[in-house]
Image (tube, grey):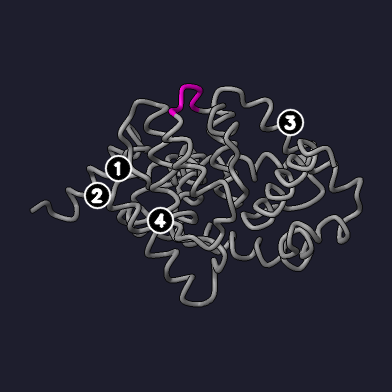
Amino acid sequence: MRSPIRKNDIALQMLQANPFELVCSKEYQEIILKVVRKFRQTGGFKQESDSEVVQEITTHILEKISYIQKKYSSEHGNFKPYFAKVVYNYALDLIKLAQKRQNFNNDLTTAPPDRLVSNIRPELLNDELKKLSLYLAKNKRHQAKFVLLLKLYSRSTIKAQDIRNFLPKVSPQVLAQALETFGKNYAQLDDYLLYQHINALINEAEGKNKSADAVRKWLSARVVELIQWMNRRSKFQYDREALRNLVRLFFMNEESVVKGY
C-alpha cells in the first residue's frame, strides 16, 4: 500500500503531466461528488442531477487547470484537501449565482415555455431564440447529434427527420421503435430508460459501444458550453433550467413553422 506522501507525489506529477487524467479519475470525481452531495443536503443544486453538477464542476476545473498548477504549492499541504477546497469554493459560487439568477431573472428560469412569450418582451425573447439558432447553426460537426440530445434534454418531441439527420440510413424498424418512445409526450418517463433508448441510436450511428452514461456526460459538457456561450452574449443569465425552458420554446416554435402556424 502506498504511503500518503508517495501518493501525493504521484498526484502532483499527474497534475503537471496529465491533469485531465487526474481530475477525471475515479478518486477525484468522488471528491467532487462528495462536495455536491454535501451541498444538496443543505438545499443546494435542487434542479440538477449529481452527474450534471459533477460534470459542470469538472469542466470548470479543467478550464482553470493552468491556474491551479501555478497556484498550488507544498505550503498548502497534500493536494487532495486542496483540490476539495477548490471544488467546494466553486460549488458555493454556483449556488450563489443560481440564487442571484433566480432573484434577478425569475421569469426565464421558472416560467413554463408557453408563458415565456407573455412574461418577457417579444423582441428580447426573439433575440434569445436567434442566439440559440446561431449557436446550433455554427456547430456543424455535431449539430444533428446535439439537436437530437437537446430535444431529449428539454423533453421535446423527437421527429423522424431529427433521427434521419443523425442516422440517414436508419432502418424502418429502429425508427419506429425510437418514435414509439420519443415521438410523443415522454416527460414522465424514467431518465435512465430514456438515455438507454437514445444511446442505442447513437451507438448505431457512430459504430461504437459506449454506455448511456457516456452520452449523458457528452451532453452535459455541451450544455455547459452552450450556457457559457449564451451568458457571454445575453442580457439574461442562464442556468440549466433557464436554458431548458428556452430550448423547449425554440423547438415549439420550430414545430409551429413546420405546421405553418
Give the foreground label among 3 and 1: 3
Which of the marked residues, 2 or 4, is nearer the chain's N terminus? 2
Which residue is the site of mark 1? 12
Inspect the image, locate mark 1, and give the three-letter code of the amino acid beneath it: Leu
Give the foreground label among 1 and 4: 4
Q: Looking at the image, which residue sits at the far bottom? A: 42
Name the residue: 55% across, 64% down.
92
Instruction: Write the start and end of the magenta stretch as one range.
Output: 167-171
* Residue 150 position in % (x across, y down): 59, 43
Indicate which disc residue 192 carries.
Answer: 4
Give the foreground label among 2 and 4: 4
Above or below — where is 110 with respect to 235?
below
The Cα atoms of the two marked residues, 3 and 4, are separated by 31 Å
Which of the marked residues, 3 or 4, is nearer the chain's N terminus? 3
Kind of element beneath mark 3 = helix
* Residue 144 position in % (x across, y down): 57, 29
* Residue 91 position in % (x across, y down): 52, 60
The Cα atoms of the two marked residues, 3 and 2, are separated by 45 Å
Magenta stretch: dominant secondary structure? loop
The Cα atoms of the two marked residues, 3 and 1, are separated by 41 Å
Of 197 and 36, nearer the camera is: 197
The Cα atoms of the two marked residues, 1 and 4, are separated by 36 Å
Name the residue: 37% across, 45% down.
212
Q: Are marks 3 and 4 in contact (CB under 8 Å)?
A: no
Indicate which disc residue 134 carries.
Answer: 3
